[in-house]
Amino acid sequence: MSLNVAIQTDPIDRLNIAGDSGFALMLEAQARGHRLSYYTTDRLAMRDGEVFATVEPIEVRDVKGDHFTLQPRERVRLDSFDVILMRQDPPFDLNYITATHMLERVHPKTLVVNDPAQVRNAPEKIFVTEFPDLMPPTLITRDLDEIKAFRDEHGDIVAKPLYGHGGASVFRLTRDDLNFGSLYDLFATVFREPWVIQRFLPAVSEGDKRIILVDGQFAGAVNRVPSAGDLRSNMVRGGAAKETDLSAREREICERLGPSLREKGLLLTGIDVIGGYLTEINVTAPTGIRAIRRLGGPDIAVKVWDAIEAKR
């Protein structure tokens, strides 16, 4: 079965292919004989209710600095594709949301991974709050009195923007940290959305585990360990990828999330777990596929395409 596949992603020449999960999915699709086309969100257009994109047929190869060849551009209706992979990175802003509205016009006739309406309705740091018993104590607000009360109760806290990504602007504040007021003023000026305030988890020094689920089933995991002197374990912030197994608690978390992920059509998700606590459910462009494979784990791209082909 040969499928006509489009990938909506960031500019192809800027991808870090060593860590980009979308690129791993492209390599696997090509290996299976599927036809690939590529476009960025600024090439989307909706005219009289029909959605188009100016795409470039693409061939990919796992060679740094020489990882793609493009064919001439062509304007096509998006519903002419069998599958669209929505793989552009956050920020989860109005541009991202608009793209989900456009892709919703062609899904499910064209299978969009992940379901664009559910991506829009499941912001990563809000969707996770549907499972409060699996999370550390968490507050979402920009109200100073609420934050003060939460800090008084828990002492050591972490603050981050609600729609942040990649570990950007994540701060730890202790009970007596004199930077609290200044940080509040900074966040109030820079970020219009609420913020996420969580009890600090000391176990982060042992790693922030990224667990990949495919169609609601555990597929693989990598432990991301912060570099010395840094709170953040994201690999784009210098975190080191380490092989890992799941604990009983982490398997329980996966089993709890699975039915909801399948129901929402979130075929590829990445959850973050620190010290047995679920902190995020990543549904936009979850990473980790290449790191898991590099450490000797399963080839999750194979599992993703097995699931996609089963739905087509």
Image (cartoon, helix red, strand yellow):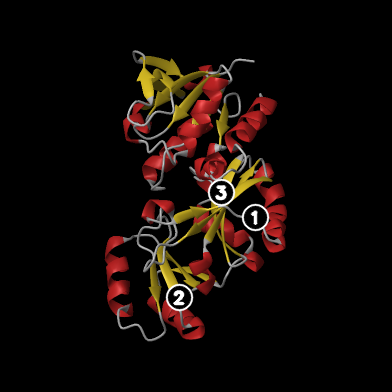
Q: Quadrant of the N terminus?
A: top right
- Residue corresponding to mark 1: 245
- Find numbered disc 3 in the image and state the secondary structure of the residue it sits on: strand
Q: Residue at x 50, y 52 (%)?
A: 123
Instruction: Residue 181 in the image: state x and y as whole percent.
Output: 30, 79
Q: Is residue 279 above or below residue 155?
A: above
Q: Amino acid at mark 3?
A: Gly
- The nearer-to-camera label among 2 and 1 is 1
Q: Residues within 10 Å of mark 1 (few under 14, many from 20)?
A: few
- In the picture, residue 15 is in which quadrant? top left
- In the picture, residue 193 is in which quadrant? bottom left
Looking at this view, is 85 or 241 the one in front? Answer: 241
What number is the disc on residue 157? 2
Q: Residues within 10 Å of mark 2 (few under 14, many from 20)?
A: many
- The nearer-to-camera label among 3 and 1 is 1
Q: Amino acid at mark 1?
A: Asp
Q: Earlier in the sequence, mark 2 or mark 1?
A: 2
- Residue corresponding to mark 3: 270
- Asked if labels 1 and 3 touch by Cβ distance under 8 angstroms, the answer is no
Q: Amino acid at mark 2?
A: Ile
Q: Earlier in the sequence, mark 2 or mark 3?
A: 2
